[in-house]
Image: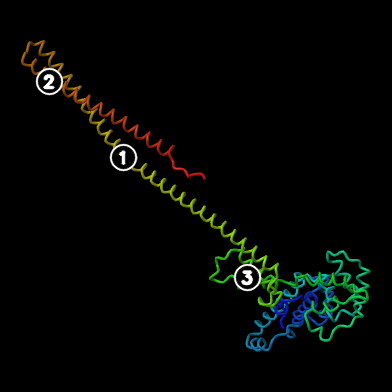
Amino acid sequence: MSFTKKFQRDEALVHILHSELSLLIQKLAGRVYKSDVLKKIDSIIAQGVNALEVKHFLPLAEIVLSTEVKEELAKVHSNDKSKFLKDVQTHYSSACKYLIEKAHLTKLTKALRCLHPDERQKRRSCEDIITVSKSLPLDVQDDILLDQWKLLQLETENPDSKITRIEHFWNQFFSRCDSLGAPKFDVVSKVIKAALSLYHGNADIERRFSVSRWALTEDKSSMSERTLNAILITKDAVKQYGSPNLVPITKELIASAHCAHRNYQLYLEDVKIKKEAEQKKSEEEEQLKKELLDKQKQTEDAKKDIQAKELDLKKKMKDHESAKETVDTLFKEATERLENAIKNFDMKEVKLAHAMLEGVSKMKEIEEMKCKEVKSLTQSIQKRKSNVISSFMYKKPKLQNK
């Protein structure tokens, strides 16, 4: 079984973590390093990556390769083969150094080997169990722990117990009592249970993601986090009994079901109220948006109308100025002709001058009326502008506050 597959199992494996990692490092190092390095792998792990020196490399010809790789190498040029073998050395060396740096092969992980059934009766397990106890946040007296551990070493284990899960192996001792009926290994039990609860990797976390992915199928993609957590909690609870039909129907379970149903009804009512409030708010915002767009359109239309009237006003003012100049010129000419006619006693010219003055007077009256129209139009435009600004600035629609 591969290293990664072995540690994907759903059980405590901290007791073999150090030995398996050390073995993995030995396997990788054995591909490119001399046998002397493999013999002192524990000291190398303790010293760190600097202990893996280039001088300990195997000759290129002795590097361990699979048959398939050797057959392929036989087909390439010697220079390419040499380069490839050096890359192999670098690759395996880097892998070993990475494991030594990242695997956290500490004194605790090494001491956890005492939890292995084969280590129980070994002398070094006494020192290891003390190390484990001191590394965990437990209020345990070392002398009492050591006394119980030595007594536990004398206990006889059940046949075939070593092939079961590690927690089942230790449970056979924890259930044993002394002559007064008190637990015989209560302190040891406390330490071992705490140690076995330590994670040996990310398998449990990854498994939880897998369970979540199984529960959150494509047709349930809109499931809330609260509902998903409720499903996972229920699955964990049922798992203790093995199957849903084996869960005992007790008064507490029925009461919990009634309470859960009541809470769910309240939750649905709360969701309904919130949804209605959000919908109402959305409708009001949509209405506000519509009114603002209408107001904007009205403003644009008013602006265009004002611009058209201003153009008309400019044209009328220009025509009025031109007509006024014409009237003034004609009035001046008629007056001069009248004065000259009187001086020369030319009655015919006097009548003609009077006729011109009468015509100019009528034209002047017409232009005065047009001037009043221009003033009226100017006032109308100014008033329209003022109304548009007031309407836009001070009469914006507002949301109703409930």
Q: 10 Å neighbourhood of mark 1: few (<14), some, or many (≥20)?
A: some
Residue 356 badge: 2
Q: Which residue is mark 1?
A: 305
Task: Pick whichever, 197 or 68, lies toward us.
Answer: 197
- Sequence order check: which comes first, mark 1 or mark 2? 1
Q: 10 Å neighbourhood of mark 3: few (<14), some, or many (≥20)?
A: some
Residue 181 lies left or right of residue 239; in this view the side is right
Residue 212 badge: 3
Task: Pick whichever, 307 or 120, lies toward us.
Answer: 120
Label 1, label 3: how far apart the Cα atoms are:
65 Å
Image location (x, y in percent) of residue 219: 53, 70
Under circle 3, the secondary element is helix
Query: Please, is residue 271 above or below residue 354 in the view?
Result: below
Residue 208 lies left or right of residue 291; in this view the side is right
**Mark 3: amino acid:** Ser
Under circle 1, the secondary element is helix
Residue 373 badge: none
**Mark 1: amino acid:** Asp
Residue 293 can be seen, yes or no: yes
